[in-house]
Image (cartoon, coloured by chain):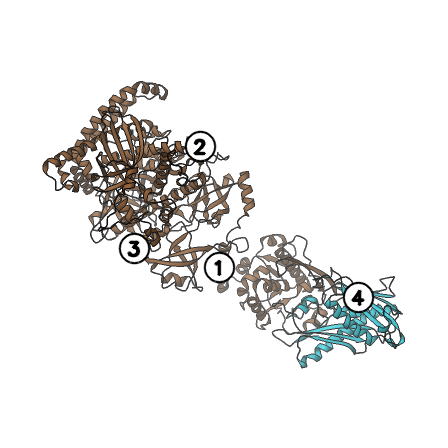
Chain colours: A brown, B cyan
Amino acid sequence: MLRTEKVLQLRGQQGRAVRVVREHYLRPDVPCRSALCRSAQCRAACARDGKLLSDDVTHYVVPDCKVVQEYLEILEFPELKGIIFMHTACQAVQHQKGRRQYNKLRNLLKDPRHDCTVFANEFHQHCYLPREKGESMEKWQTRNIYNAAAWYHNHCLGQMPVVMVTEDEDAIRQYGNETEGVFVISFKNYLDNFWPDLKAAHELFDSIVQARRERESESQENHGKEYPEHLPVEILEAGIKSGRYLQGTLNVNKHRAQLEAFVRLQGFGSKNTELQSDILIYGTKARNRAIHGDVVVVELLPVHEWKGRTVALCENETEDKAPADTTGDPMPTGKVVGITQKNWRDYVVTFPSKEEIQSQGRNAQKVLVTPWDYRIPKIRISTQQAEALQEYRVVVRIDSWESTSLYPNGHFVRVLGRIGDLEGEIAAILVENSICAAPFSEIQMSEMPVSSPKNPWKVSPEEAKKRLDLRDSHLIFSIDPKGCEDVDDALSVRTLPNGNLELGVHIADVTHFVAANSYTDVEARARATTYYLADRRYDMLPAVLSADLCSLLSGVDRYAVSVLWELEKESLETLRVQYRRTLIRSAYKLEYETAQALLDGDTSVVGNILELQGLDEGTRQQKVAELVWAISKLTDIARHVRAKRDRCGALELEGIEIRVQLDDKRNIHDLIPKQPLEVHETVAECMILANHWVAKRISEDFPHQALLRQHPPPRQEFFTELRECASAKGFSIDTRSNKALAESLDRANDPLDPIVNKLLRSMATHAMSNALYFSTGSCPEEQFHHYGLALEKYTHFTSPIRRYADIVVHRLLMAATLRGTTGDVKDNITSNKDLEELCRHINNRNRAAQRAQKQSTELFQCMYFRDRSAESDERCVADGVIYSIRTNGVLVFVPRYGIKGAAYMKNKEGLVISCQGAGSCQWKPGSLHRSQHKITSTTATGDSVTLSLFDHITVRILVQSSRCHAERIKLEIIRNAPHHTADTEAAHRSSHGVRSDLVKEVSQSAEEAQRAQERARVEVMDEESQEFCQTKGPSLYQLLEEIRELALLDVTQDIRT
Amino acid sequence: MAGLELVSDAGFRADGRRPDELRKVRARLGVLARADGSAYLEQGNTKVLAAVYGPHEVRGSRSKAPPDRALLCCRCSSAPFAGGGERRRRPPQGGGDRRSGERALLLRGVLEGAVLGQLYPRSQIDVHVQVLQADGGSWASVSAAGLALQDAGVALRGPVVAGSAGLAEPPAGPPVALSDLSAAEEAAGGPRLVVATVAGSGQLALCQLSARLHQERLRPVLDAAQAACRGLHAVLDGV
């Protein structure tokens, strides 16, 4: 007997590596248990137990460890005979597969009917091979088994061929031809060659292979870990500093949440300037457990692994893993190596329906729920109420996401409401945007001044003394949308004794009622803005303030903060500005429509003005005349200001707004896109002016802690799409500066189709980044610029009732004006750092408010169309304009409802659309071909349809319902021709506006003449700039004039039809 | 190690021995020149060094010494590098830890039965045993001490050897007695019977059983243990 030692590295209980030395005895008298064996020594040893390997088989088979572990079930077939299980293999089963499997193997070995045996090769002195240094366990086992097989063959004096089956390719190559009579082949090969008729075995083999492959794909490579571990913080920080890693915010692509996410880098102008675009994170593996919104650290992949973003339209439901052949140019691609900040919030989810739960199998306690937001991965929830919660929208929180788990773990928080129910869906929108709109608390209400119908609030005499009283001297009025309750701005204009004009913008004095750091203030700061949803709003301030005391209603005394400009009477140049706390009484509360009518000279609307009712005719006439003069003067001033801004390059941008018209029972009556009126612009211009001047003032007084609003210039690459689209219509868009952009957008006007310009403008808007609040101390003065409005400094001052930023600005302004007079201005201003923090918060809340508004509008759009059957209802068919071409469809804008959506030209079965002459479209087999500006679908029969950019087509609006997510509008192409009824409808509508259009036209030309004069004055300068800019036309002004004429022509044409 | 089976179906133990086979034994005498007698014993991976000083005059307080026979002083210790749970705590200076103390006591009990103490009245025999490497079988120290005493020329009733046996109860099949347990087998948690014999005559100087064992099973285990002793004796005789 020989003695050797085995050295094992074992893991101790605390996970420490322990070196263990075991004895290992080798002997010559290990029984081979073959009937063929003639050696006396063996015979004696075998005599102890009866079972012997029969000698009437064609070969002996020696399975490798892997084979025994994986395919034991096949080896159990009684047809398979002459199997020698090596001791090594049995050990492997025992250690790696657990007791059940091992017992199965043992029973198999004991079963006298089954012709198999075990050979203790590891104890045989000729068969045992010690493991070599650095040799992997598997390799050693294979080597050992092969060695034993070879010995066995020799031991039986070569009478019986031995077949070793292994899954190890290397072993097959290495040992295949080493010994004659010992064959090394793969198990599949073995079954194919030796047991071709054993159908059951083959089937079983296939199913095992399949199952194993699935398991492997599920838990890939690293020891059952789904994701690589995140790197420790120190390494990340060092990596970011050295430029090896990049930090940014993760944005998951909503339409391809499974695959695509982008990281927008933090800190522009960092060292790493060659990396302009976002970084693509492709696939969930690379995303490594980061959730949308997290601040992550990424490592760039080598250039050859870079991928492009997918261009094809796709629906989220189909998680087709097919390789996306339709990708764009490769862009920087990376993988997440760490998460610096987890921005997890509450998520709205839906439990799977009953059938789905059953399919999930054994552990019904753990339920995978689907978040409402596509960008959030499914969350694993442990609950027993899964069935009860099926019909509800539910709030959950994510607890953790281990690297071993495919999905994050979370827990159930509360129920919002039933799926599809309006209240439930609205609540879901609120939660998704982290909007908390609970009613105001007792303590906050107790801070409010009392105002009831019996005991109305009154101006206090002491306060009145401190303020400038404008009640009698000024004609003040407000212009607001219909049904507006929170009037926070009013306007006035009058002629001063010296002949100059005085323009006044009066803003509700909210800060008088809301002291800094009071409970109400803290609450308002938390909300940061009033949230307007399609059918309701959530106020930032309690109703007693927002709808009553602070609201500049007509006929009541109100505190205000006023900005008063003295303007030169002819040139309208600003001579003097004063900022004052005032006491005002608004005379009229007008609606935009009424004001526009008055401006247009339509006196029939006078009857609508409440304040003028009950007066005798004479006074009324006089008052109306005063009012009309004021409005028209305002408009003049606004035009002037606007023109000035335009010269600097202000952009006129287009956003599509939709108003939901509800009937008495709060059902959705109709969807109406907002009609822009000139008065809108007038009011907006005045507000911009006020904001601009206030911004100037506060930034001068507080150069390091003023709250301003900036609009950074957009990145040029975002304009690529816009430029391409415009070139489809033959326009060239110059995006080098805001002025150039504004001018080229003005030029890009198709006289036959006004929507083209609208769409181009909306695309331009889309390409720009959002305007943001910031603290002047946190960025250099060059960046204060507002790109869209073309102003050096801008802030928000005019809506303190519904924006918290305005409240801050009010306090700053008051501190600025009071400086020197009173000492205690300190409590009104915050330090730069706090202000920065506050700005970030307000920006976030604003974004949330916008999203919530958009989502609620979409919700209403869907509800509007859901109730109508798409097939029969006339309203579901509308005219659409193509504004973008993708590889498998087009994006369409429906002007009637202001809907943007995708229309497919190739459906999931791979059929393409084909339009008959009559118009109706059908799905037929064929192919799609996309070029830059058009897409052609060719059917197998040879018909083809070509759609190009800005084509008008007829679409049917459908609602794509979804249990887990918000419903979506889906468009279906019906005809590739404009929709006629929609056109006529549009014509009808425009005929209503004929009068006003005409009037506007006249006033426009008058304005034009006025402008021409101004232009003449600056023409010298213009000519100079021409020389350098090298414009082709004779003068820029003429060019603009031509376009203006074209535009006018267009309007009249429209009217005639 | 719940899954460990002591004896495989093919009749082999985990280290390749058959149930009745002992581990490999090697022994040398007179390894330490300064001691009166010394022995080095290797039993599998267990390695023990024993040294005997004496008989010499009683040192320290004479009152302790029995008047009619020799005073046996036994001291056991483990090298810090011995492993196998022996090095958990460093023994305090000069003294042994509890386990060593217990072992010393046992050793003294065995040796008192083997040494013809009345031949050496008012004298002292010191026996020092050091475990250099532990791999089960602390009884190897008994055998080593016996060898060292022989080497020192102390009169004995006969050579002292100790052996152990355990019982394997495979899920199927009859229980099998295992001779000479290794550390892994001890750790498996079965019963362990340690037996020390004097003079190879079958006289038991020590019989220690850990864990419960059915009365009926005692006999085969005891037989196996005695067989182990006999086997060991046979080997040591040749040294």
The residue to which callout 1 is attached is A211
Left or right of residue A217: residue B51? right
The residue to which callout 4 is attached is B129
- Mark 4 against mark 3, which lies toward the viewer? 3
- What subunit carries mark 3? A
Position of the C terminus of chain A, as image quadrant, is top left
Give the mark, 3 or 2, whose residue is nearer the N terminus: 3
Q: Where, by quadrant of the figure, is residue A814 drawn?
A: top left
Q: Is residue A827 above or below residue B220?
A: above
Of all residues, the one furthest to the bottom in this rendering is B216
Q: Amino acid at mark 3?
A: Glu
Res A969 visible: no
Q: Nearer the viewer, residue A708 or A970?
A: A708
- Mark 4 against mark 1, which lies toward the viewer? 4
Res B53 visible: yes
The residue to which callout 2 is attached is A780
- What subunit carries mark 2? A
- Mark 3 against mark 2, which lies toward the viewer? 2
- What subunit carries mark 1? A
Same subunit under labels 4 and 3?
no
Left or right of residue A971: residue B25? right
The residue to which callout 3 is attached is A423
Horizontal and vertical percent position of residue A269: 47, 34
Query: Do the numbered discs 3 and 2 sit on residues whose CB atoms are within 8 Å?
Result: no
Q: Amino acid at mark 2?
A: Pro
